[in-house]
Amino acid sequence: MSGEDVLGQVGGSNLVLLLLAAFIIIAIFLGVRIVPQSEKYVVERFGRLQSVLGPGINFIIPFLDRVAHRISILERQLPNATQDAITKDNVLVQIDTSVFYRILEPEKTVYRIRDVDAAIATTVAGIVRAEIGKMDLDEVQSNRSQLIAHIKSSVEDAVNDWGIEVTRAEILDVNLDQATRDAMLQQLNAERARRAQVTEAEGTKRAVELNADAELYAAEQAAKARRIQADAEAYATEVVARAIADNGLEAAQYQVALKQVEALTRLGNGAGSQTVVLPANALDAFADAFSMLKGKPK
């Protein structure tokens, strides 16, 4: 064998080895897939869904399997949308909404819907109009949190088949036309005036009630005082009557004589009077009182 034949054989062997090494490298490159934490890969084999690769290192069959779709699983926000709606009491309103969602099952999202954002936006618009149509304008303004909860629940049910989770649905604003705003302002002013009148009337009523209570309390206290005074007078009369019953007529005469003496004393002590007026039987009254005092048993 000549030297040229040997060189030819060696060169052919090296070429085969190089080709084999290249094939192995390409197979490894195509068969190993490292998926980022924020993504999922949809793998197809001959155009058919094969598997979904999660975050980390994954292995597929090279030349047979291929990564057809790289889907981000981060939370997304739809552009703020404005849609017209008519309330139950026939008021036209403009609702500004915002929706946040994320993809949980990429295989459903990829093979069941073409434009996810447009589909969700259309669904939200229809649900918002339907929910607004069930409520009066006052309910829309006052029960916004309840309305948001209903919209979120309805959107979740609608997009469940697309492998999507709605994380948040917000109503940013409820806008009215100028005519409706003017009418609401007039209604608000009228309501404020009515409340002021009611408050004033209630205050007047309360004042009258308090005055009546005060007068009733004063009357009750006066009646109580008269009752106490009458009880005292009755008690004094009872004492006098008991003394008369126990000591006879002399005790009564003694009491009368003492009263006469006390009256004359008060009259004599009066300011600006230098004249003392005595009844005709004053001396007799003194004598009777003195004699009764001496004769009163000790």
Image (tube, grey):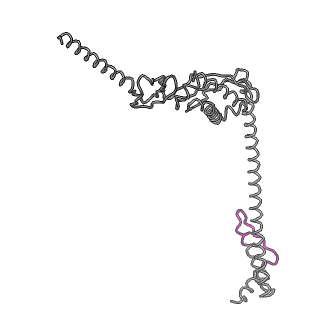
Residue visible at 60% across and 27% down in the picture: 172
Query: Which of the pair 28/268 is nearer the observer?
Result: 28
Query: Which of the pair 196/69 is nearer the observer?
Result: 69
Q: Quadrant of the N terminus?
A: top left
Asked whether residue 267 is drawn in magenta, I would say: yes
Q: Position of residue 14 (x, y in %)?
A: 25, 17
Asked whether residue 111 is in view, the answer is yes
Residue visible at 49% across and 23% down in the picture: 46
- Asked if residue 278 is positioned above or below residue 241 in the image, the reply reads above
Residue visible at 75% across and 54% down in the picture: 213
Query: Which of the pair 85/176 is nearer the observer?
Result: 85
- Asked if residue 16 is positioned above or below residue 215 in the image, the reply reads above
Q: Where is residue 286 in the image (x, y as percent from the top left)?
A: 75, 80
Q: What span is in magenta?
A: 265-283
Residue 152 in the figure: left or right of residue 266: left
Q: Quadrant of the C terminus?
A: bottom right
Residue visible at 62% across and 24% down in the picture: 96
Q: Position of residue 98 (x, y in %)?
A: 58, 26
